[in-house]
Amino acid sequence: MTLLRARQLTKRFGGHAAVDRLDLSIEAGEIRCLIGPNGAGKSTALALLAGSLSPSAGAIYFDGSEISNVAAHDRAKRGISIKFQLPSVFPELSVRQNLKIALSRRYLGSELDDRIDETLDLVELSDQRGKLARVLSHGQKQWLEFGLAISLKPRLLLLDEPTAGMTPEETERTGELVLRLNRSGVTVVAVEHDMQFVRQIARTVSVLHLGTVFSEGRLNDVLANEDVKKIYFGEAPRHG
Amino acid sequence: MRSVLRLLEGDQTIGRGLPFWGLMSLLFAGALAFGVTAGSFAVENCSYFLVWVFMALGLAFMWGLGGTMSFGQTAFFGIGGYCYAILSTNWGVESGLTMAAALLSLAAVALSAAVLGYFVFFGGINGVLVSITTLAVTLGLETFLSQTAGPKWAIGRAELGGFNGISSMPPLTVPWHGDNVEITGRSLYFGLIIFVAITYLALRILANSKVGDAMVAVRESPLRAEALGYDVKAILFVGFVVGSVLAGLSGLLYAGWGQYISPDTMGLSAAALPIIWVAVSGKDLTATMVGTVVLLGLSQALAIYGSQYALVSLALILVVSIMGCPKGVFETLLRRIDSIGGPGDQNSKPVRKSSLDRSEVLL
Amino acid sequence: MTQVELIALAYQFGLAVAFLILSAAGLAVIFGMMGIVNMAHGELIMIGAYGTSIANRHGLPLVLAALCGVLASTATGVLLERTVIRRFYDRPSESLVMTWAIGLFISQAALIVFGPSLPSISSPLGSVAFGGFSLSIYGLLLIAFGLAVPVAIYLLLSTTTFGLHARATMQNVEVARAIGINSGSVYSATFALGAGLAGLAGALYAPTMSAVPNMGGSFIVQAFVTVVTGGGNLVYGTLPAAAGLGLVQTALTAVFGNLVGVLGLLAAVIVSAKLFPNGLAHRLSGKRFS
């Protein structure tokens, strides 16, 4: 079943098209990584899918219905969740309060408390529950944001460079977390630079270049492609 | 009912447990006892203090929780006061019509707050520009009302009166056995004490409810709040309207208390007062409620030498207190008291061991 | 409409626009470059006017007296920045409350020290008759200043080293620091510049209005309105915003009188906030504050 489909998706800033007639199709249960050189339009594409940007042209379908003009908060309610590139948590609230505010949208009373504890365990922040989010380390903030992003039980989780600024060990544990979430039924679309991480989590990757899909397939096949190598080193042939 | 009462305590309000509620009950009982024993002038003067508490609580709610710093509180205070003055002058005191005037004034405040809030928040104005826009509207309203002197500015029997404002409208009354009992003096004082208490408790519940969660989420990170499915603009709008209506309530109570309302209540220095109360006290509801009354008493004591001395001292207090005690004087005090009652519930749960397959339970 | 009436109307329009620009310039500079809303702006204007008025009364010619006014407000600005404002650079909401409290303090202190009003200074330069209509030469001077100030600021920012440093700091503080720009002194200088421009407005309008402690109030609505509409850039924001708002105000005042003119100004702001939520400058230049 196709969970998410983008058709001819375009976003122009002034005269420049950051995303240019992008076609993308994500199956339910998949983990898809979007890779590509800087400025390829990966983050913009993710923002369009999450609804924090609205498209200049084209359409997005989620679970069979068009969501191109659905507001970001309504997409969240329909089951699309995003983890931003810069950790986006509630800085002046405690770790526990961060999760409470996210989880109280679904749960009440003692069940809410249980879910908060479970999520704290899951993102390994139980010992930090009383700390203000702003004093957490970068990696801990990233994990807290994971906790926030999955609290709505999303069907589709969008990750914008989830391992940016993490140590190799943190990166690997993040990969395990993503795989675990995926096993429990969450479809994942991740923008990522770290090929080690991509190899760990993804079966299929899409290479973005100049705002559109340049190549798609298994990671090793795609990386072996001469044209893909060229765009990573700057002398890109136009997409044909 | 029980689940609603649970919300009296929570992350978004300071104060929990027996010591806190004991102290608050003591405060409430003391206020009632004061109303019985004190002289009638002192009681009436205290009513004057209490009148302003609603406006301060409204600002603490929208600013402390939602992060919206509005200079519009005095504008809605004025709208509430003027509406009550106009309606009650025209309708008189028969058969509880002053109550109808009061309710209709609140509706008018809610409507004007909704219109302004719509343009501000759904127009995409945010941050400090919200404060400036509300200030411009407040001063514009003052300018308008200041030049409404003369008979051509009259609504029915009520002349707007320019700088002088409107005076000698009836106080609030309740019909009682065919008679109309005026709510003034002691009865107004007791009414206000009870009303302040109800408003305070209701706001505490609202603050700890999902509404409060949503407002805090938006204040802390609009981006993340939106990604969690919160409608950011709608939440800012709701907080603004609730806070503004409370300012309107202060305004109509003020008009009923002194039977007088003028454009001065909306001027630059008037608009400063709620900001000073809330910023010096701390944006917590309890801190604001107590702090507002204390600061009003203080400025009254200083104003014996002229209002400029009161304002100059208040301004200085504000500067010093923000630099020395950024969370607010009374809020800092309250946190001290609160910590006597033991640690909050955030550490009360035993820390469980991490389990790898927790996600299967969770998702 | 006769030619004379047309010129009279153009003159009114020019005066309205100049007033909006001069009121807003100092506020716009500080907001645009530092993101701080200086609520003591009106009081800095008042200090400019008071300085001018007092110096003039002590026998200084008006030009020198005006200079004294500008110096007084600049000095106040420097003092405030050094003692208070710099602690609040990264907290826009608190800096708003803080500057507000300072403004209140200044105006009430002025009331205590100087009393409810200062003797007014007479408007210089006389007027020229034009048809049946007389134009005040001083009014024309105000219009000239209204146009010259944004141009001067633009030149300051685009040609001088200070301008270069200021623009770099504004766009990215960290990078600016990393290449050796002292962002602290850039902020201090910017705040002083904004305070000086506020003082200039006060000095220029001192001969045309009575000097009272809360005279800043007659400027700040216009100042805020212009900055809300235009954003923080003087050339791309303040100028066109002032022109548009001035047009609305002049037209409404001419037809319906003063009150509708002011109310029209507010309505125009709210509508333009809906149309250009990030300010005109954003729309016109494609970027914020640059």
Image (cartoon, rainbow, N blue to C red):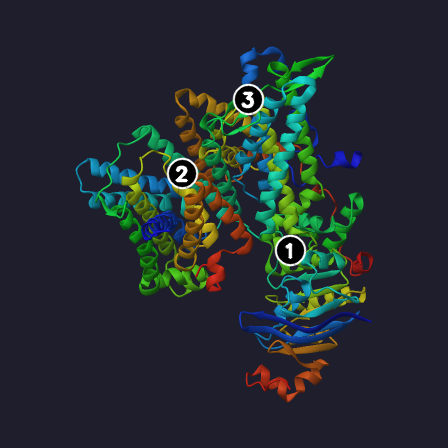
Element type at mark 2: helix
Above or below, A112 relative to A211: above
Circle 3 residue? B48
> Disc 2 or disc 1, which is closer to the eye?
2
Compute the Cα span from label 3 to label 1: 42 Å
Chain letter of disc 1 in the image: B
Q: Is residue C7 left or right of residue A232?
A: left
Under mark 3, the amino acid is Tyr
Q: Nearer the viewer, residue C228 or C93?
A: C228
Whether residue A187 sits left or right of residue B288 in the image: it is right
How crowded pointer 3 is (Cα within 10 Å; few <14, some 14-19, many 20+) is rated as many
**Residue positioned 54% across, 29% down in the render:** B292
Secondary structure beneath dot 3 equals: helix
Of all chains, the one bearing label 3 is: B
Q: Could you tell me how far apart the alpha carbons at marks 2 and 1 are, in whole angstroms?
A: 39 Å
Say which quarter of the image contains residue B180.
Answer: top right
- Residue sitting nearer the eye, B335 or C230: C230
Residue B359, compared with residue A199, is above or below; it is: above
Question: Which residue matches tag 2?
Answer: C217
Q: Residues within 10 Å of mark 1 (few under 14, many from 20)?
A: many
Q: Which residue is mark 1?
A: B224
**Amino acid type, callout 1:** Arg
The subunit carrying tag 2 is: C
On the image, the x and y values in percent for residue A128 come to: 66, 51
Q: Which tag, 3 or 1, sits closer to the chain's start?
A: 3
